[in-house]
Amino acid sequence: MAESKWRGRTLGKDPREIHQHCSPRGQKLEQELYKFLRQYRATPHSTTSVSPSEALNNRKLKTTIPELPLKQQQPSMPQDPSASIAQRDAMQKQKMKVYADLKAHAHKRKIEPGEVVLMRQPKKNKLTTPYNPKPFVMEEKKGSIVTASNGSQTVTRILLNLKLFLRILQTAKRIVKRKMKKRHQEWSKSLQKPRKTFR
């Protein structure tokens, strides 16, 4: 059980574990290390589906790892291996990005020049608001870099440091409306309750 646990890990995590694994059995550390490295270099990578040795030397490494016969195997290395590895790697990274964006509910900010925005400000004390209450008008946008001004001051910031002013007003109005509705419901319920009469 200890052997399978140790084989599943990479050496970068804890090299002392290899020494502890080898010493009670009387095995030499160097031999076990070479055996581990040979198996690691011959195992196909999950992203590229090509082993590190095969990617480096452009040929398969002879090992005792069980494999399918050559007739049943698909050709693992095409004419240009580095291009296909890079392509598969890019594809896997794109998959991970899409998954992470879905989990985080990420979306592009749709702020155009001419719109009123609020700027994020550094927190100085407990009472400091996350955004500067003075609104800015966005003048220019180059990719994710934005230039905005409020008449007396012109600033250049990243798009992440901006928030659409109208969206904040709409959210505030929605919250106020919800609170007013709740108060009205509570008030109407209190009127409907029968009053106690004392005799």
Image (cartoon, grey):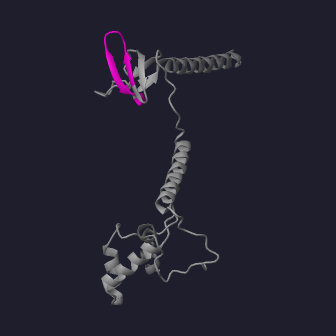
Q: Is residue 75 above or below residue 137?
A: below
Judged from this view, the residue extending furthest toward the front is 79
Judged from this view, the residue extending furthest toward the left is 124
**Residue 102 locus on image (x, y percent):** 56, 43
Q: Is residue 26 above or below residue 63?
A: below
Magenta-span inclusion, residue 151: yes
Q: Residue at x 50, y 61 (%)?
A: 80
- Quadrant assignment, res 149: top left
Magenta-span inclusion, residue 198: no
Q: Which residues are magenta?
A: 146-160
Q: Residue at x 43, y 23 (%)?
A: 141
**Residue 161 locus on image (x, y percent):** 39, 28
**Residue 65 locus on image (x, y percent):** 51, 80
In which quadrant of the rendered image does the C terminus lie? top right
Q: Main secondary structure of the magenta part?
A: strand
Q: Residue at x 42, y 30 (%)?
A: 144
Q: Nearer the viewer, residue 190 or 124?
A: 124
